[in-house]
Structure formats: structure tokens, C-alpha cells
Image (cartoon, helix red, strand yellow):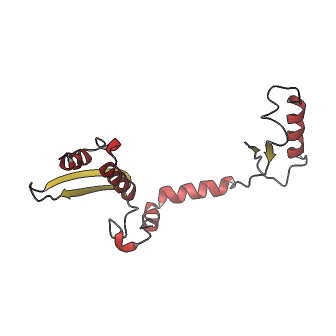
Amino acid sequence: MLLWFNPPFSKNTQSNIGRQFLHLISKHFPKGHTLHKIFNKNTCKVSCSCMSNMATIIKRHNVMILNPQVLAANQGCNCRIKANCPLDGACLTPSVVYKATVLTEDEPPMHYIGMTEHEFKTRYRNHKLSFNNPKYAAATTLSSHIWDLKKP
């Protein structure tokens, strides 16, 4: 098990904060201490993290709020085989209302209308999971109907 201490990087820092941190570990968790197995120089590592500055964070947030069409344009499809995409290249579209039709030889078609808050692809994947795994048979009305059809 490794514990990482990631102080933000700054050229303005005069002290060696990593060395001071490891010195504090050695001082407060000496060899006889009960927590020395967890907190020592071999299990605690230091690495500076490079974070975005405040101007970049605010600019990214403003672009996201003021230009929602930019986000929508970036969303499309990440299917490996584009021909198998459930929405013809738009499976990453969020907030979709969809209609599923269950066709059987014995019964009339059953229509299921659903909606998803997240990407459609995630919802589609969850439906497929509930069709194949009995543990999730009662997850949705559609999966309950599919499992009723599977019963002999």
C-alpha cells in the first residue's frame, strides 16, 4: 500500500516541502510506533501535482455554461464498430426519450417508452445486462417483461 502526498507545484515555494513532509513522518511515527507499518518513508511518497490555475478553471466553466451547443457537438459515438451503434452514431447523447418494441411470435408487440438522464449508451448497456442476468430481472418494466417471456 502506498500513500501519496501531492502538494501543488509552485515556483514561488522556497522550502523543500517534500523533505519536510517525510521528516514529519519519521518524527511522529518512529520505529516503535504502532502505525509505523503504515506511515513510513517506504509507504509514503511525495509528488508535486500540476493543477490548472484559477483563470483556466473559470474559463472552462463559463464555456460549459454559456455554450451548451459546443458540448452537444462533441458528443457522438464511441462505439468500436460504428455499424452496431444503437442510435446510428449518437449513442452518447444525454437525456433521451426512447421507445423499445418487443416482438414475439405468440403475442402482439409490446411497446416500452423510457427515458435516460445520462448517455443513452449507458442505459442501453444496463437494459442488456438486465435481460441476461437474472439478478437484475426486476430492474425495469421492460426487463420484467423479457424475463416473463423467457419462463417456460
Point out residue 9 in the picture as x, y percentages from the top left corner.
79, 52
Answer above or below: position of 69 versus 137. Answer: below
Q: Nearer the viewer, residue 113 or 63?
A: 113
Answer above or below: position of 67 versus 82. Answer: above
Point out residue 56 in the picture as x, y percentages from the top left corner.
64, 58
Residue depicted at x 39% and y 73%: 82
Q: Most extreme residue toward the front, as rendered?
A: 152
Q: How many marks?
A: 0
Residue depicted at x 36% and y 68%: 85
Q: Quadrant of the N terminus?
A: top right
Residue depicted at x 83% and y 37%: 40
* Residue 150 left/right relative to 65: left
Q: Nearer the viewer, residue 35 or 54?
A: 35
* Residue 152 left/right relative to 119: left
Point out residue 6 in the picture as x, y percentages from the top left corner.
75, 47
Q: Nearer the viewer, residue 145 or 3?
A: 145
* Residue 111 left/right relative to 53: left
Answer above or below: position of 33 versus 133. Answer: above
Q: Nearer the viewer, residue 62 or 86?
A: 86
Point out residue 61 in the picture as x, y percentages from the top left corner.
55, 54
